[in-house]
């Protein structure tokens, strides 16, 4: 049995790269960028008007001129027009080009216009007001997006504005999610009193959805031949396999043996933690990986949040997420010499996260996962944890 820290080290050193693919911008949302994106021109690409009004030369106003001849109107999208001779101005619109020769925009609220003449009423006019200078935001060639960026709405807007219609992103792997257990029935079925409906695959598929191309849900009875029939093809066909159940010390827990039969190398089995002690990690002969998690719902979900998701992010080339921490809101006692991942409900008190423990009724208390929204990692080597202490937080995504 290894420690949580040793499991992290093994996982960190076992993250493959899944390659890249080029997709259209319309399919890029949520993907991991694998190229550097630069500004194709200055941002903004011209001196841009930032308020409706009249464009003037500030020096003329500073010299005492208050009335200007209106040369015309320049709506947004119109090509630039020179300011013209002394005493001229243009009516301009937000987002439009500032006429060459002008350097200041006086808003309509501070102007009267009659008979082709605009009179400035403002007592205070500043050079360059209401003008967004060319290149003020970014210069042509500056890096806008770095590899590893998760493409959200803001990043999609940047890609569009630089004309990046084809985007190089991480190729998403397919995943197989295999639940084992004689007691399990499909969600559409009515279980007998000694049976339960499958829930682990649905939770894990939801967790993996942003990171995988597809997830195939499989089920096997607690039988060596049945497990072989489901697991061995999955090892050949999918680079990412998640198994729930069949990894403890029971007589019918055959997952480790079938993995080895299929050519997989078990890198670790059993971690000194609760829940999730039987957690197993293996590498397939095809270069894929297997996360074999305990079958109890809380154990499986905790291992998926704590280990599987960070690993998948790393393998996808995403920028590492910053660690989160929370203050313990209630005292806790835990006697076993194990790292304890306790479900908690997190609240934000004036910018500080406080974690309220919700231990529930064991690793089968699936309903307690709904009441909580994170796991708090309580280190091994001690049995009492005091209010006000700070511990690592693993929030649900």
Image: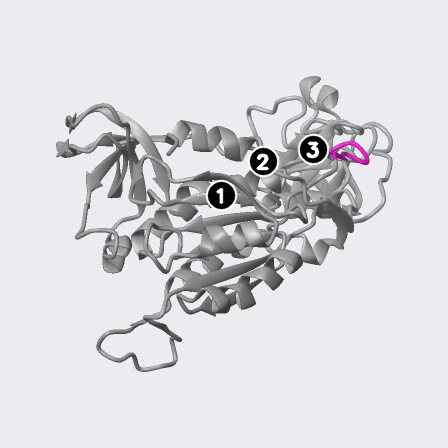
Between residue 290 and residue 77, name the one nearer to us. Answer: 290
Q: Main secondary structure of the magenta part?
A: loop
Q: Return the residue at label 1.
A: 281
Between residue 76 and residue 327, name the one nearer to us. Answer: 327
Q: What are the residue bounds of the magenta stretch?
A: 36-43
Q: Return the residue at label 2.
A: 14
Residue 123: x %, y % from top left: 55, 25
Q: Earlier in the sequence, mark 2 or mark 3?
A: 2
Q: Secondary structure at mark 2?
A: loop
Between residue 396 and residue 74, name the one nearer to us. Answer: 396
Residue 46: x %, y % from top left: 78, 34
- C-alpha distance separating marks 1 and 2: 10 Å
Magenta-drawn stretch contains 61: no
Q: Return the residue at label 3.
A: 144
Q: Earlier in the sequence, mark 1 or mark 3?
A: 3
Can residue 67 be spotted in the picture? Answer: no
């Amino acid at each position: 049995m290894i420690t949580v820290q040793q499991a992290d080290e093994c996982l960190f050193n076992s993250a493959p790269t899944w390659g890249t693919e080029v997709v259209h911008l319309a399919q890029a949302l949520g993907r991991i960028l694998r190229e550097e994106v630069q500004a194709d021109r200055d941002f903004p690409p011209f001196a841009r008007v930032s308020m409706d009004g009249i464009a003037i030369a500030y020096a003329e106003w500073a010299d005492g001129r208050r009335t200007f001849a209106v040369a015309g109107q320049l709506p947004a999208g119109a090509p630039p027009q020179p300011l013209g001779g002394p005493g001229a101005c243009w009516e301009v619109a937000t987002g439009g080009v500032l006429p060459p020769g002008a350097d200041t925009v006086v808003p309509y609220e501070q102007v009267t216009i009659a008979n082709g003449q605009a009179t400035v009423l403002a007592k205070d006019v500043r050079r360059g007001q209401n003008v967004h200078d060319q290149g003020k935001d970014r210069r042509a060639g500056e890096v806008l997006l770095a590899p590893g960026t998760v493409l959200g709405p803001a990043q999609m807007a940047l890609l569009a504005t630089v004309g990046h219609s084809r985007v190089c992103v991480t190729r998403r792997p397919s995943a197989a999610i295999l639940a084992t257990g004689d007691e399990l029935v499909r969600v559409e079925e009515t279980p007998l009193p000694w049976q339960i409906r499958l829930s682990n695959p649905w939770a894990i598929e939801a967790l993996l959805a942003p990171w995988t191309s597809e997830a195939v849900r499989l089920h096997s009875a607690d039988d060596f031949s049945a497990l072989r029939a489901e697991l061995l093809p999955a090892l050949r066909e999918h680079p990412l396999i998640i198994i729930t159940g069949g990894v403890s010390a029971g007589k019918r827990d055959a997952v480790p043996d079938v993995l080895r039969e299929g050519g997989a190398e078990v890198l670790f089995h059993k971690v000194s933690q609760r829940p999730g002690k039987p957690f197993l990690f293996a590498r397939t002969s095809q270069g894929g990986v297997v996360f074999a998690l305990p079958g109890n719902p809380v154990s499986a979900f905790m291992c998926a949040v704590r280990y599987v998701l960070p690993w998948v992010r790393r393998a996808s080339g995403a920028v590492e997420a910053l660690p989160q921490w929370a203050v313990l809101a209630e005292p806790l006692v835990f006697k076993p010499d194990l790292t304890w991942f306790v479900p908690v409900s997190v609240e934000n008190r004036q910018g500080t996260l406080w974690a309220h423990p919700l231990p529930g009724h064991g690793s089968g208390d699936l309903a307690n996962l709904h009441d909580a929204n994170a796991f708090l990692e309580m280190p091994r080597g001690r049995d009492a944890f005091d209010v006000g202490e700070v511990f690592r937080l693993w929030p649900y995504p």
